[in-house]
Amino acid sequence: MKTILSEAQLALTVKRLAHQILENNLQLTDTVLIGLQPRGIYLSDRIVHELMQLLPPSQIEYGKLDITFYRDDVRKSLHLANETDIPFSIENKKVVLIDDVLYTGRTIRAALDALLAFGRPSKVSLCVLIDRRFSRELPIQPDYAGKAIDTIITQKVKVCWKERDQVDEVVLL
Amino acid sequence: MKLSTKHLLGIKDLNRDDIQLILTTAAQFKEVLQRPVKKVPSLRDVTIVNLFYENSTRTRMSFELAERRLSADTLNFAASSSSAAKGETLLDTVNNILSMKVDLVVMRHSASGAPHFLAQHIPAAIVNAGDGINEHPTQALLDAFSMQEKFGKLEGLKVTIVGDIMHSRVAMSNMYLLQKMGAEVTIAGPPTLIPKYIQEAFNVRVEYNLQKALAWCDVANVLRIQLERQNQPLFSSLREYNLAYGISRSMLESINKEIVIMHPGPINRGVELDSDVADGPHSIILDQVENGVAVRMAVLYLLANRDQ
């Protein structure tokens, strides 16, 4: 087991991602944040929390998206759905999708499909905590990445959050 | 987590976890149905045949819509306009359809047990959309979903089922489901329409006085009088039935309590339910219909997704 991000590093990384998003979308004008269920929500909650320190909360539009019904492997194994809650229109908005780990890209492919059911965004960008480079099965890349790592297929990246795992860290198993 | 059964033949075969899984999944599909694009690609490689040996408007349209919202390919079969009218047996018809590579069969039949018979002879998964006077599981599931949505839970809920219990597959499925989920049930109606054994068989109360039964409950699920299944008169006239067991606004006002009114449709207005009650503020009849699509999507999704 190898630590990729310690608690202190993780906190700084989340702060940096929040600032980068704000840097590219000043005042978050016409910008909405959407976390991917289930595990992306921990990261998106933290990023939104950071943004709240920098902007009035009324300027932040934040939703949650579940992509279960859009997966390309639904028939191979049963996946249970989580809540989707997007209480605003994404029509002509700049959407920042937020997930914890970018690996094969298939989840993001499904998320893009799912997102289009809600309207036509003017732009979609992707923010991830961990980018597992060289593991992609689809041409999808992140716009904001906490940390890029090189891994082999037998390795597993585990992202732990205090809310669920009692500790904040990212480890390689 | 997945369903413990391969088919949905009746609520009788489901356990509590199965029912909860279907209701939870249905809530997610209900959200999907509020989106601008109400369609998901989940079952795009699945073919479903709707086999209706008995008439239906709501159930059939609801299933068809659920299938299309899931992107499944669908085939429709109505007995009246098919070779069944030429004398082809049920098993032959289904085997012919299955040889066209169909994965799921949604079936309604006037003979109780027809889907159970089919389940023993074909490899495809079967969803019972109503068999004779036995069960109508998706109706009970959508009733439960609607009650849960309204009250937040089923446990401890007091439900009165009113009317033609003897001929009602909706009553049967509802009794199984409500008991498994810990709700209390009272059966109300004329003695001729309530089977004698029901009290022991289902551990329900029986109340012949409608007003008392309504005053006791949180929800009244009112059933249709099924004249087509009664081959001998079981009450003297529809007018008399309405006077004794029809729910009117004055009846509801007399119990001095707000109760929710449900009906599986089609309504015989002025028989079991007066119009001002059916269209009244406490009626959730149209919500039931709306929820039906989400519940059927959940059932089809969970049955099609078999771990191979």
Image (cartoon, coloured by chain):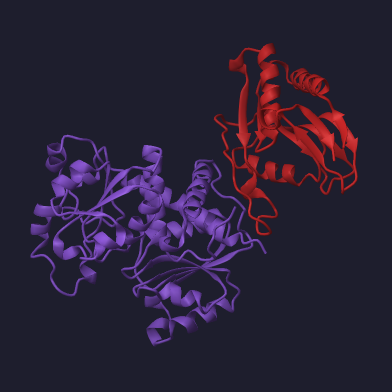
Q: Is residue B263 something one can see in this rendering?
A: yes
Tell me the residue at 60%/16% (across/down): A57
Q: Is residue A95 something one can see in this rendering?
A: no
Q: Is residue B95 above or below residue B11?
A: below
Quadrant position of the C terminus of chain B in the picture: bottom right
**Image coordinates for residue B152, horizontal then vertical, percent:** 40, 38
| Residue B72 placement, left or right of B143 | right
Q: Is residue A104 above or below residue B266?
A: above
| Residue B281 placement, left or right of B296 | left
**Image coordinates for residue A82, horizontal then vertical, percent:** 59, 41
| Residue B245 placement, left or right of A153 | left
Q: Considering depth in this image, is B7 or B227 the residue closer to the camera?
A: B7
What shade does chain B have? purple
What shade does chain A have? red
Tell me the residue at 8%/58% (across/down): B240
**Image coordinates for residue B35, horizontal then vertical, percent:** 53, 41
